[in-house]
């Protein structure tokens, strides 16, 4: 493992923790965008094999989508529904940070239990991908605002992308691009849905959606 | 070796008040003011030392001991803290724990002296100080632990100025992420422990927001001079920790080493001045959040090192 890998791993771990610890939605959106860019770079830098055309294409598409298109869409939605911060999450921000540290420990432990054949490149990349998936799930479970949940979903997708690109390696470019397209459509639809929720109910707290509007 | 270490201690004793002067000058330049003289802290100290102290009748010996013990603890911490690649005057395995708890002892006596005045106002400041220290101290200790594991050394001199494997410019590139994480954590601890701006404003006497200033309101004369000088030394000692992590440039020749280390410290002073000028003070409720961030950085570094 070289210094570049190390630096990217640490930076991505920090973006995950920043997502958990920050209450301002615009900061969270940018953090997830930066994470997407890092994972796109990681797909190119962390591989043992030389760079192929296909992989370069996938990485480029993912950087453009996650680094530019998604944050633009989400920031627009956040502005339209007039939400700037996650006010009362189910789990407080400092507690979330400490839970994030626990998740990091669990991810590293699982990574150390994996057989070495499943972990050919850097020893820290697999645990990091697992950590990212767990943070995404935790964000979805612990936050109230619809936009935070979209961010959790995107974070999870980032983790799965990193896992696929670094471990499996042989995923056809069509499949990767298809997944990226699906994610794009999902974010697009979720942004519209968020806007409609806010139009109907004057808020985007998803925990109140199961109550009837009287 | 002992001579060089002695020189760096003497430099710290002489130049620590200048560190505060540089921070204030940078803030003044940012605000477009001329600012107080660079040596203002020295003038303040000289004036305070010539005055007499006033003691309230409700106070006991604890109140009188507070400033002296705090200054003595900081001086002792200075003796085990290496600066700029020069080993510390005293070093032994485990002195990093001593270092952390000397700072803790100094804080304890400042807090106890504040409580001894019987003023509810000072009690409030004491409670805040302890509340924030409870989070800042684990961040400091875990950061030191991460560095200790990485450099296989249990003493501060071994970590920052050891013969091999210590934090130097070459090693810095290899273990960059870890040192950066720990350095970031130490910078936040530095700002919190020294009551600098994102945590506490050293200039304000606004009662709702102060932490450190409120605890030392009742001290006067030489006692207050001790507190101010101790505060300046604390800046220097914790600053040496931050500089050791983030700016580990050690010249080979012994002649240049003190000059370079002083230059590094003054760079830190400029950076702190810039931070103070561009940032606003955090609300009191979000300060623990910032310190939890520092703790997180330390823990991530420690986990990565152990892994």
Image (cartoon, coloured by chain):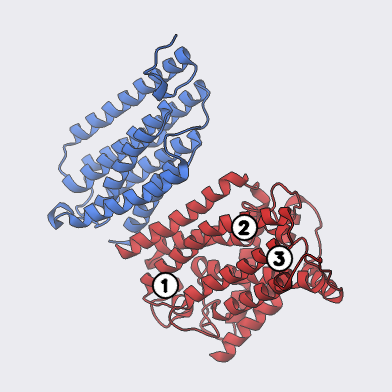
| Nearer-N-terminus badge (3/1) | 3
Along the viewing direction, whichever of A189 and A66 lies nearer the viewer:
A189
Foreground mark, 2 or 1, reads 2
**Secondary element type, mark 3:** helix
A76 vs A10: above or below: above
In the structure shown, which secondary structural element does the residue marked by tag 1 occupy?
Answer: helix
Task: Give left or right: position of B54 versus B119.
Answer: right
Q: Residues within 10 Å of mark 3 (few under 14, many from 20)?
A: many
> Quick one: label 2 or label 1, which is nearer the N terminus?
2
Q: Are marks 3 and 1 in contact (CB under 8 Å)?
A: no
Q: Is residue A95 left or right of residue B23?
A: left
Residue B248 image offset from top left, x and y in percent: 50, 71
Seen in the image, is A111 located left or right of residue B120?
left
Q: Are marks 2 and 1 in contact (CB under 8 Å)?
A: no
Chain A: its colour in the image is: blue
Which percent across, then down, holds residue A123?
A: 24, 57
Residue at horizontal 59%, vertical 91%? B3
- Please tell me which residue is depicted at 27% across the width and 46% down the height of the picture: A129
Q: Which residue is mark 2?
A: B129
The residue that mark 3 highlights is B20
Give me the C-alpha separation between circle 2 and circle 1: 38 Å
Which label is found at residue B170? Answer: 1
Chain B, colour shown: red
Q: Residue at x 62, y 85 (%)?
A: B7
């Amino acid at each position: 493992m070289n210094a570049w890998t190390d630096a990217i791993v640490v930076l991505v771990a920090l973006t995950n923790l920043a997502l958990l610890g920050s209450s301002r939605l615009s900061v969270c959106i940018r953090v997830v965008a930066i994470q997407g860019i890092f994972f796109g770079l990681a797909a190119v830098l962390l591989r043992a094999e030389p760079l192929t055309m296909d992989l370069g294409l996938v990485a480029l598409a993912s950087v453009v989508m996650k680094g530019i298109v998604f944050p633009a869409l989400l920031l627009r939605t956040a502005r339209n529904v007039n939400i700037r911060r996650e006010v009362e999450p189910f789990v407080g921000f400092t507690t979330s940070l400490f839970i994030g540290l626990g998740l990091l420990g669990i991810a590293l432990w699982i990574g150390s239990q994996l057989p070495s054949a499943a972990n050919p490149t850097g020893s820290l990349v697999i645990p990091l991908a697992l950590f990212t998936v767990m943070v995404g799930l935790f964000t979805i479970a612990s936050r109230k605002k619809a936009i935070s949940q979209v961010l959790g979903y995107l974070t999870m997708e980032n983790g799965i992308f990193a896992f696929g690109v670094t471990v499996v390696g042989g995923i056809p470019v069509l499949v990767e691009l298809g997944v990226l397209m699906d994610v794009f459509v999902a974010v697009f639809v979720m942004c519209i849905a968020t806007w409609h929720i806010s139009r109907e109910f004057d808020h985007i707290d998803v925990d109140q959606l199961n109550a009837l509007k009287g | 070796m002992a001579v060089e270490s002695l020189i760096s201690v003497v430099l710290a004793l002489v130049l620590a008040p200048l560190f505060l002067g540089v921070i204030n000058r940078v803030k003044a330049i940012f605000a477009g003011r001329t600012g107080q003289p660079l040596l203002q802290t020295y003038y303040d100290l000289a004036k305070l030392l010539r005055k007499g102290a006033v003691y309230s009748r409700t106070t006991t010996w604890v109140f009188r001991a507070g400033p002296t013990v705090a200054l003595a603890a900081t001086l002792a911490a200075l003796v085990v803290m290496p600066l700029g690649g020069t080993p510390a005057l005293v070093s032994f395995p485990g002195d990093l724990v001593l270092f952390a708890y000397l700072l803790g002892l100094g804080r304890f006596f400042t807090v106890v002296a504040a409580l001894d005045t019987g003023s509810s106002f000072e009690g409030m400041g004491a409670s805040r100080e302890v509340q924030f220290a409870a989070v800042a101290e684990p961040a400091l200790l875990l950061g030191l632990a991460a560095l200790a594991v990485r450099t296989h050394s249990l003493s501060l001199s071994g970590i920052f100025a050891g013969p091999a494997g210590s934090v130097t410019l070459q090693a810095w590139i290899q273990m960059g992420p870890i040192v950066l994480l720990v350095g970031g954590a130490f910078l936040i601890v530095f700002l919190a422990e020294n009551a600098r701006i994102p945590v506490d404003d050293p200039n304000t006497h606004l009662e709702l927001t102060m932490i450190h200033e409120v605890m030392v309101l009742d001290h006067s004369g030489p006692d207050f001079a001790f507190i101010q000088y101790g505060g300046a030394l604390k800046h220097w000692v914790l600053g040496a920790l931050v500089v050791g992590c983030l700016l580990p440039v050690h010249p080979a020749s012994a002649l240049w080493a003190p000059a370079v280390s002083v230059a590094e410290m003054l760079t830190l002073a400029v950076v702190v001045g810039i931070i103070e000028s561009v940032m606003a003070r955090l609300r009191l409720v979000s300060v623990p959040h910032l310190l939890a961030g520092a703790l997180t950085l330390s823990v991530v570094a420690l986990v990565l090192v152990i892994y």
